Image (cartoon, rainbow, N blue to C red):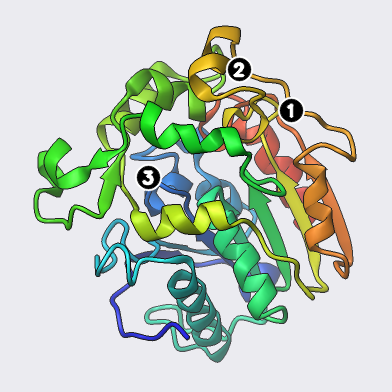
């Protein structure tokens, strides 16, 4: 059982109107922080928060344990998916009870939105606490991480962040940082579909991933008894989930094309949600981090139409 007391960094934006008591809890992926949901630092056309706020939704963007301004405990023992699942569960309990500081709201509807590793955390929440979320959006997600993904840890120069980046000099060596710009670009972006200046901001402000998180990724996703609706949004050219070869080979062939059939790795995620009231999949014309692509606003609209 995961237990402990930690400080969690978060940004709250209030809602209004009929959606003021609906809270979207946004969970970033590996190597990012809550800034991901604002289009990094910041791009309005890539900001999920701005789009949701314009429609009246309240949002709470959190830094997962071991990331951003949240506490950075032991990266192997503590910064693992079970702890981050409990973190999310406790936040939801506080949100429904009106006990999150500065919100002054008892939220009656909770929407959990994850990206990549954040989606894995959301799936863990759905499995352990199936009644927590009223709706679940899993972005940058698929049934499992394919075996060829494991090579990323070597090919992207995943190094101890305290040695590779002065910003992280005080962290334990178990916090790791990606350092191969070409591979990072290939993993997260679809060529020609993004702003180079935004990608530069991305690389210059890249975060870390812990050894504990990395081991959790490889363990795979969980089947759930969750009964709410599920929407999966994964880029049509997601190099993490849809590459046929290891990254060093796939990069020679260019970004992959995801198998969008029922037998494809993305739609197979429906088997994790046999009791969901609905399960839908969207494939935007983008890479893994589709929120950071030029057409992000179109997909924001599709997601929020689904939520409505």
Provide residue 271's location: percent of width, then percent of height.
84, 57
Q: Is residue 303 above or below residue 90?
A: above
Q: CA distance from mark 2 to mark 3?
A: 21 Å
131 and 186: which is toward the camera: 186
- Quarter residue 38 falls in: top left
- Does the image show residue 115? yes
Whether residues under marks 1 and 3 lie with C-beta atoms below 8 angstroms apart, the answer is: no
Horizontally, residue 105 falls left or right of residue 179, namely: right
Return the disc, 1 or 3, that comes first in the chain's sequence.
3
Provide residue 287's location: percent of width, then percent of height.
59, 27
Provide residue 153's location: percent of width, then percent of height.
40, 37
Return the disc, 2 or 3, that comes first in the chain's sequence.
3
Residue at image location 28% in from the left, 46% down from the top:
176
Provide residue 294's location: percent of width, then percent of height.
56, 24
- Quarter residue 245 falls in: top right
Quadrant (top left, top right, bottom left, bottom right) of the C terminus: bottom right
Residue hosting label 3: 31
52 and 90: which is toward the camera: 90
Residue hosting label 2: 255
Q: Residues within 10 Å of mark 1 (few under 14, many from 20)?
A: many
Residue at image location 89% in from the left, 67% down from the top:
277
- The mark tally for this picture is 3
Horizontally, residue 260 falls left or right of residue 33, namely: right
Q: CA distance from mark 2 to mark 1?
A: 10 Å
- Residue 162, numbered circle: none
Helix, strand or loop status at disc 3 = loop
Residue hosting label 1: 258
- Does the image show residue 57? no
Q: Is residue 197 above or below residue 217?
A: above
Q: Residue furthest top?
A: 252
Horizontally, residue 38 falls left or right of residue 219, namely: left
Whether residues under marks 2 and 1 lie with C-beta atoms below 8 angstroms apart, the answer is: no
């Amino acid at each position: 059982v995961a237990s402990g007391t930690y400080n969690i960094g978060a940004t709250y934006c209030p809602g209004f109107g009929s959606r003021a008591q609906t809270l979207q809890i946004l969970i970033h992926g590996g190597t990012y922080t809550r800034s991901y949901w604002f289009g990094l630092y910041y791009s309005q056309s890539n900001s999920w928060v701005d789009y949701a706020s314009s429609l009246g939704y309240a949002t709470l963007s959190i830094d997962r344990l071991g990331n951003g301004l949240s506490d950075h405990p032991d990266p192997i023992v503590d910064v693992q998916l079970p702890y981050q699942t409990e973190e999310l569960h406790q936040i939801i309990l506080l949100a429904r009870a009106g006990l999150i500081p500065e919100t002054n709201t008892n939220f009656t509807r909770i929407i959990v939105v994850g990206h990549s590793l954040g989606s894995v955390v959301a799936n863990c929440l759905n499995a352990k606490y199936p009644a927590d979320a009223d709706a679940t959006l899993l972005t940058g997600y698929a049934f499992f991480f394919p075996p060829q993904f494991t090579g990323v840890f070597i090919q992207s120069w995943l190094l101890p962040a305290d040695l590779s980046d002065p910003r992280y000099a005080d962290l334990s060596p178990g916090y790791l940082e990606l350092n191969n710009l070409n591979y990072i670009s290939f993993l997260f972006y679809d060529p020609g579909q993004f702003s180079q200046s935004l990608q530069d901001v991305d690389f210059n402000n890249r975060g870390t991933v812990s050894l504990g998180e990395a081991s959790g990724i490889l363990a795979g996703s969980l089947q759930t008894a969750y009964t709410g609706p599920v929407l999966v949004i994964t880029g049509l050219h997601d190099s993490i989930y849809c590459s046929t070869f290891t990254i060093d080979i796939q990069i020679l062939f260019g970004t992959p094309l995801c198998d969008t059939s029922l037998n494809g790795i993305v739609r197979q995620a429906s088997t994790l949600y046999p009791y969901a009231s609905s399960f839908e999949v969207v494939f935007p014309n983008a890479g893994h981090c589709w929120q950071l692509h030029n057409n992000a606003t179109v997909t924001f609209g599709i997601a929020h139409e689904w939520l409505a």
